[in-house]
Image: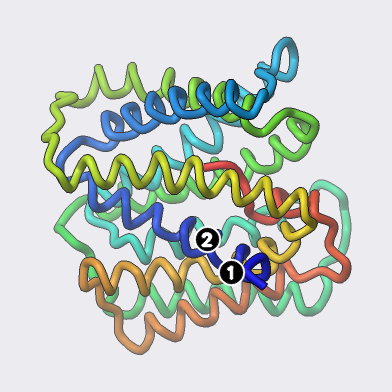
Amino acid sequence: MLARFIPFIFVVLWSSGFIGARLGLPYAEPMTFLLLRMLANIGVFLLLVVILRARLPTGKALGHCLVAGLLIHGFYLGGTYIGISLGMSAGLCSLLVGLQPIVTALVMFAAAGERMRPTQWAGLVLGFIGIALVLQGNMSWHQDGNRTAAYAFTILALLGITFGTLYQKRFCQNVDMIGGAVWQYAAAATLFLPVALMTETMAVNWTPMFIFALSWLVLVLSVVSILLLLYMIKHGESSKVASTFYLAPPMTAFQAWLVFGETFDKYGAMGFALAAVAVYLVIRRPNIRPAQATQYGVSSR
């Protein structure tokens, strides 16, 4: 009975990543924050490699893990953290990058020359309408910042997670997920370190809230979520993750409302609902195979 709720638990935990980012960013600049998170991730996953007797990829597999890590953790997390640090609400950021399954489907159809089904076209149209409603509505920003830059970095994050998951599916399918994650986090750390050195003060205010946020992101997002994903793949539940992933943006908006009081008007509510339906229509496929979960939005965080 409990196993039936695991995909939904996964989505709830995944959504909380945006909340953890906003909780910690007042106490550390985005690249510094992410560098600390990646270093902590590496330490924890090296411990898991020993405990679970996982294998660290070598050779070409190592190189593929580094590329996937740069895209998924480097550009995706980097873009979202900078967007939030510039004032974008956690809910809006989640909504924009949550369109990744739609963008992924468009890229795949364009590359394969396949035709989209009518329901997928309907999902695409609903997605654009949903985004337009959210942007038109009174979606709160938690501070005045450069909104153009925030949108630009969020789009960079969207492209990073889209092409990162496609790359991971193409080249990292047979890679041990625990061992591969070590190299992925290492690749992201090598990106964040020079950027932090050149653009940030790297000062950290080690308040209890920052320690909580960092611990949550490392232990809950990067560890528990990955172990849940491994469990679901092993027991054939990852298809349910793919079909419920459309819940992530509205779940993030709900969590942001609870924690930060982020508000949105009726247009925003309608936009979130339409975007959720849009992603569901695009990723919904009959008899989807477990291996396709990564293709439609499930990747290691």
Q: In the rendering, at what x and y percent does residue 113 appear? A: 87, 53
**Nearer to the camera, 125 or 237:** 237
Q: Quadrant of residue 89?
A: bottom left
Measure the C-alpha gap from mark 2 to mark 1.
8 Å
In the picture as drawn, the residue positioned furthest to the top comes out as 59
Name which residue type carries label 2. Answer: Gly
Q: Quadrant of residue 275?
A: bottom right
- Above or below — where is 59 with respect to 90? above
Kindly indicate whether the residue at mark 1 contacts the one at mark 2 (C-beta within 8 angstroms).
yes
The N terminus - image quarter: bottom right
| Disc 2: which residue | 98
Q: Which mark is residue 164?
A: none
Count of marks, rendered view:
2
Q: Secondary structure at mark 1?
A: helix
- Above or below — where is 261 with respect to 50? below
Name which residue type carries label 1. Answer: Tyr
Mark 1 nearby-residue class (10 Å; few <14, some 14–19, many ≥20): many
Left or right relative to 217: residue 228: right
Residue located at (31% from left, 43% from top): 82
**Nearer to the camera, 88 or 180:** 180
Earlier in the chain: of badge 2 and badge 1, it is 2
**Nearer to the camera, 135 or 57:** 57
Mark 2 nearby-residue class (10 Å; few <14, some 14–19, many ≥20): many
Q: In the rendering, at what x and y percent does residue 85 appear? A: 24, 47
Residue located at (39% from left, 75% from top): 134
Left or right relative to 43: residue 279: right
Q: Which mark is residue 246?
A: 1
**Nearer to the camera, 153 or 11:** 11
Q: In the rendering, at what x and y percent does residue 100 appear? A: 59, 56
Q: Secondary structure at mark 2?
A: loop
